Image (cartoon, rainbow, N blue to C red):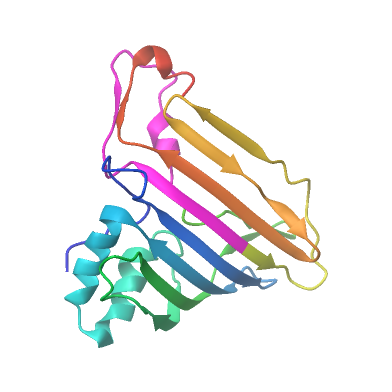
Amino acid sequence: PPPLEPGTTSTAGAESRIDHRGEVELHADGSATLRLEQHYDGRYAVQLRSVLANVPTARRQDVVEAQLLGLALPGGRVTELDIPNLDALDEPVKLSMTIEVPNLARVAAGELVLEVPFLGSIARLVQLPSRETPLYISERMATRTRVDLRVTLPAGAELGGPLPQAKSSEALVSVTVRDRTEGSVLRLEREIEIPAGRVQPDAYPAF
């Protein structure tokens, strides 16, 4: 099947987006068990539905592992997969999965360093300190995604610092961070939107 492009959207409308919601059981060695539900809306749902409908049921798990999860969860292995509404053409595509991830967090100096998955790498867009020509953001690079994960920490683990919240919307970028603790659970809730378009040189510093 043709390659999928997780975390991307087009200029067709705000309904084209991906939501990731799940429960994470994080272990002391950085591995994790993730029970994840994904919703694909808009044009991306059309693309995903088209690909999965042409893949034999026995191979869908392999396709999801390699093409939807490979970049966000390297080495992740899907042990359960359910696609309840693949034939419901007027609904978002829903994927419910259980995933074993060998290295969701990185162990460093007695700490677990956890990067929130599924947000993509946007640092590549701002590698230059300034620009003399517009920055072109293609549909492949555009992003509209939301992540909401409830992380159960290993026994005895404590947060290494505060969880600042943030909201910003300027120069084509909209970012919301609502990370917080809920009892013993770490709630990671983030949303980012970068539409396709051009960032002019005078707007690049703010971008």
Q: Is residue 173 left or right of residue 200?
A: right
> Is residue 173 visible in this depiction of the protein?
yes
Give left or right: position of 126 versus 13. Answer: right
The foreground one among 42 and 167 is 42
Q: Position of residue 96 (x, y in %)?
A: 45, 76
Q: Is residue 46 above or below residue 16?
A: below
Location of residue 144 in the rendering, given as x and y in whole percent from the top left corner = 41, 46
Q: Is residue 160 left or right of residue 191?
A: right
Residue at (52% x, 30% y) in the render:
169
Q: Which residue: 38% across, 33% down?
A: 125
- Towards the viewer: 183 or 85: 85
Q: Residue at x 67, y 73 (%)?
A: 27
The extreme bottom residue here reads 58
Q: Which residues are magenta?
A: 120-149
Report whether 63 appears left or right of 130.
left
Residue 165: image quadrant is top right
Name above or below for residue 49 compared with residue 202: below
Q: What is the number of callouts on the image?
A: 0
Is residue 120 shown to the viewer in this render? no
Q: Quadrant of the N terminus?
A: bottom left
Task: Examine the image and state in which quarter residue 41 appears.
Answer: bottom left
Q: Position of residue 196 (x, y in %)?
A: 30, 35
Q: Is residue 131 magenta?
A: yes
Query: Where in the figure is residue 19, as x and y percent of width and height?
Result: 46, 58
54 in the magenta segment: no
